[in-house]
């Protein structure tokens, strides 16, 4: 009897996998991360009409400012505007219809064709840069991955932390205006390991996620010149000896690799995954 039940159990497990894969994104999140609220940064990336966790459809949460920010100017603007004028809704439909969307610099021409973008348009350069950044080898002590689906985002981040019992933190920097800020009282270390994910400019949502050895994450109170107070998340890299000597952090701080820790605040739509 026990032996005969194995095929049924195998069938049931397959059905469960299929069922999970067809869940709307927010339901899927609640299923696999029941004690972790979904950050607004992730909800914003998931377009309501395409909230499936399938890699070819769901993560068509569109960069709403991508099309606007990279429209061609001058002579290019006089060309057939199909590549730029195509709404991102149409682009999402193209992605949804395809069984698999290539994500490789070797397939750049095919990618541009699918999104009706001409090679000389600024968007093409941005897409090319995104692909190349995702394909760059990881630095020593770094693990990196470009997540194109909700499943892969969760899988990478939780696997690197060794647990699904996590917090996902973001900074609400949209409410912060351009002015001077000072550190407030009560800087708090909240984690000794983390996975940080950055939004990538691409026709559909892609998150560049990476982990570094020897990092610490802090919650830092900030006090603005106008008296407003905020809390911001910062990740500090304790060992930068493997970083490129021309990294922008060394130029800004006027230091050399491996000499001092380097800390950076999360940007809009960035997120840091930490163990609870």
Image (cartoon, rainbow, N blue to C red):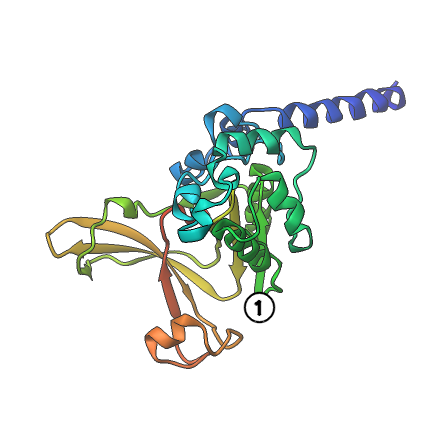
Q: Residues within 10 Å of mark 1 (few under 14, many from 20)?
A: few
Which element is circle 1 on? loop
Q: Is residue 252 placed above or below 230 in the rendered structure? A: below
Residue in view at x 53 percent, y 58 percent = 211
Q: Position of residue 212 (x, y in %)?
A: 52, 63
Residue at image point 65% right, 49% down: 109
Q: Is residue 33 left or right of residue 109?
A: left
Residue drawn at x 48%, y 55% as measured from the top left: 194
Position of residue 8 relative to residue 90, above or below, is: above
Q: Is residue 254 visible?
A: yes
Identify which residue, 12 or 88, lies in the foreground: 88
Q: Position of residue 261 (x, y in %)?
A: 40, 72
Which residue is drawn at the image coordinates 60% and 63% (left, top)? Answer: 136
Q: Is residue 234 left or right of residue 11?
A: left
Considering the image in quadrants, where does the N terminus appear?
top right
Instruction: State the residue in front, 247 or 114.
Output: 114
**How many tags in the picture?**
1
Q: Position of residue 44 (x, y in %)?
A: 41, 35
Q: Nearer the viewer, residue 208 or 261?
A: 208
Does 18 appear above or below 189? above
Can residue 272 be seen here? The reply is: no
User: Which residue is at the far left?
Assistant: 226
Q: Look at mark 1 in the image and give the residue it sits on.
A: 139
- Front residue of 120 and 244: 120
Q: Quadrant of residue 12?
A: top right
Percent x, y of residue 257: 45, 79
């Amino acid at each position: 009897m026990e032996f005969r039940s194995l095929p049924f159990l195998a069938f049931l497990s397959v059905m469960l996998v299929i069922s999970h894969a067809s869940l709307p994104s927010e339901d899927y999140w609640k299923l696999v991360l029941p004690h972790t609220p979904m950050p607004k940064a992730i909800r914003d990336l998931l377009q309501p009409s395409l909230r499936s966790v399938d890699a070819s459809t769901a993560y068509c949460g569109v960069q709403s400012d991508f099309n606007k920010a990279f429209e061609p100017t001058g002579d290019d603007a006089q060309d057939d505007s199909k590549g730029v004028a195509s709404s991102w809704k149409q682009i999402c439909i193209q992605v949804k219809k395809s069984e698999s969307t290539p994500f490789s610099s070797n397939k750049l021409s095919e990618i541009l064709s699918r999104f009706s973008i001409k090679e000389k348009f600024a968007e093409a350069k941005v897409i090319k840069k995104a692909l190349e950044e995702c394909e760059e080898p990881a630095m020593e002590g770094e693990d990196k991955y470009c997540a194109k689906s909700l499943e892969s985002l969760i899988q990478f981040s939780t696997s690197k932390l060794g647990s699904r019992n996590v917090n996902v933190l973001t900074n609400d920097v949209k409410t912060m205006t351009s002015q001077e800020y000072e550190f407030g009282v009560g800087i708090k270390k909240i984690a000794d390991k983390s996975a940080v994910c950055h939004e990538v400019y691409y026709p559909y949502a892609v998150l560049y996620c990476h982990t570094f050895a020897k990092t610490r994450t802090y919650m830092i109170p900030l006090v603005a010149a106008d008296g407003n107070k905020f809390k911001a998340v910062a990740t500090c890299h304790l060992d930068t000896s493997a970083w490129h000597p021309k990294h922008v952090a060394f130029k800004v701080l006027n230091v050399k690799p491996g000499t001092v820790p380097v800390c950076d605040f999360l940007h809009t739509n960035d997120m840091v995954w930490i163990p609870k």
